[in-house]
Image: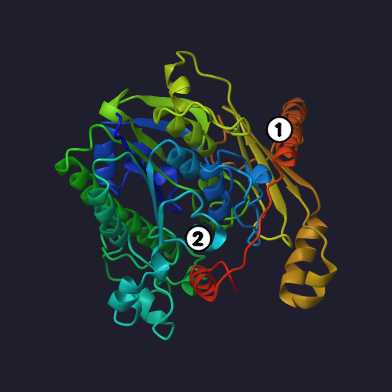
Amino acid sequence: MSKMKIILYVIDSLRADHLPCYGYKRSTAPYIQSLVHDSVIFEKAYCQSTWTRASAASILTGTYPSVHGVITMEDFMPFDIRTLPELLKEHGYQTIGISAMGNVSSTFGFNKGFDHFVDLYKDEELLQKRGRTSEYKFFKRYEKEHTIVDPLAEDITQKAIPFIEKYYDQKMFIFLWSIDVHNPFFPPIKKFSNYPYEGPIDGSNKSIRKAKRPKEIQRLIDLYDDEIYYNDQCIGEFINYLKKKGIYDESLIILTSDHGESFYEHGLKGHGQIPYEEQIHIPLIIKFPRSENRGHREGTIVQLIDLYPTIAKLAGVNNIPAYVCGTDLRKVIRTKERMERYAFVETRLKRSRALWRAVRTERWKYIVQSPPEWSRRFLFSNPFGALTFLKDFMKGKRQWLFNLEIDPEEKVNVIGKELKVADALQKIMQKWQDEILKLREEIGCRTAGEIDDQTAQHLRNLGYID
């Protein structure tokens, strides 16, 4: 245990219900399924935001978006919060971060506390390998852009192994972030989309926006599942390496996602939107050292912010900052009766867009939409964005209430029929808001930063920037 390896692997945009261990009929992830046998699977795990940067900040700070302040595309990681890698570094861990995602990069301050942080999309070796000559269609589309590359899961493994070899005899925290499952979808391996197809869906962001008919949506899902299958193969290779090195048994391995993905279940595609289940219910699989509690399926509601205290406690850290909002998940596992817990979500991709907040209980979900923040400068400088702003602003405050026991697909809004339930959940949400705003005021959460050209181009390719 003294030289434990802690591996936190985040698969961007992976929704829970597309893995066999969460009931999916397709065999999208055989290696993850094997890992489940040695692990605890959390059946009701929820993210704190429906888009990447805000969710990643919650993972590394153990706090909600309103506390750490990374809510919109304009926000950077705060100076004043001790991140998980900072805490582990103070306790003798070598801290390694390898990210394929520009939203989780040194540009936005995510290298804070890491001894080594690799922004793979800027990696010179990959630029030479794929930037101009890649066989994959996605990279050919941006062949004229020589400054960035969109890495694959296999590149993450290849970058991680040398660090493990170098620090083999030391305690390590390894933070890995893949983007294969994130749109656009150009899977290196075609398992589910390997059939004759002449329709408009080629996996590009442009084609994804055109998917409307059932066959087009199904093609989109097939490509998405292919990406999961490919990423799973790479995870399998990485786990096999850990076993061969003799460090698998004593390692803490956490596999999760930052948010899910919509395929028009509620008329929406992608993520960063209304916190329906397909966007916030994420997988969480934890292999504890020596496979403690293996085979256990935990049905209590848990959140991504719970990873910070769980990892810290297992690493022998006792001085966890008081503002960390999560709970050590081992306490949840050891509690014989299911605990009454809530999951809270908040999303505002841009200040010119609506803000969505949600509270999820065992039975209910309450969602409230608030109008965008007023900005005269924005309205006059961005006509298209202004139209979107006005549409959201005119909608004003909107509320949804779903009884997930009888309506798991969230088809029927019962806000007008279940007034007592809605009132109770509104009070719970208001109390939560008051608590997190007080925390933010106490901490301060100063931020600063500027997006470099490489990161801007990378995020443009992923559809974040117009």
Disc number for residue 326: none
Where residue 3 appears, as percent x and y from the top left, is 29, 34
Q: Nearer the viewer, mark 1 or mark 2?
A: 2
Q: Amino acid at mark 1?
A: Trp
Direction from residue 375 to residue 60 in the image, left or right: left
Residue occupied by mark 2? 106
Q: Amino acid at mark 2?
A: Ser
Where residue 213 appears, as percent x and y from the top left, is 49, 64
Direction from residue 265 to residue 287 in the image, left or right: left
Where residue 15 appears, as percent x and y from the top left, is 45, 47
Disc 1 + disc 2, Cβ < 8 Å? no
Direction from residue 416 to residue 289 in the image, left or right: left
Direction from residue 226 to residue 448 in the image, left or right: right
Q: Pointer 2: residues within 10 angstroms few (<14), some, or many (20+)?
A: some
Q: Residue 92's quadrant in the figure?
A: top left
Q: Residue 429's quadrant in the figure?
A: top right
Residue at 29 percent across and 40 percent down: it is 170
- Depth check: give the residue in front, 93 or 174: 93
Q: Is residue 307 visible?
A: yes
Tell me the CA gap for discs 1 and 2: 31 Å
The answer to whether 281 is drawn above or below residue 310 in the figure is: below
The answer to whether 249 is drawn above or below residue 212 in the figure is: above
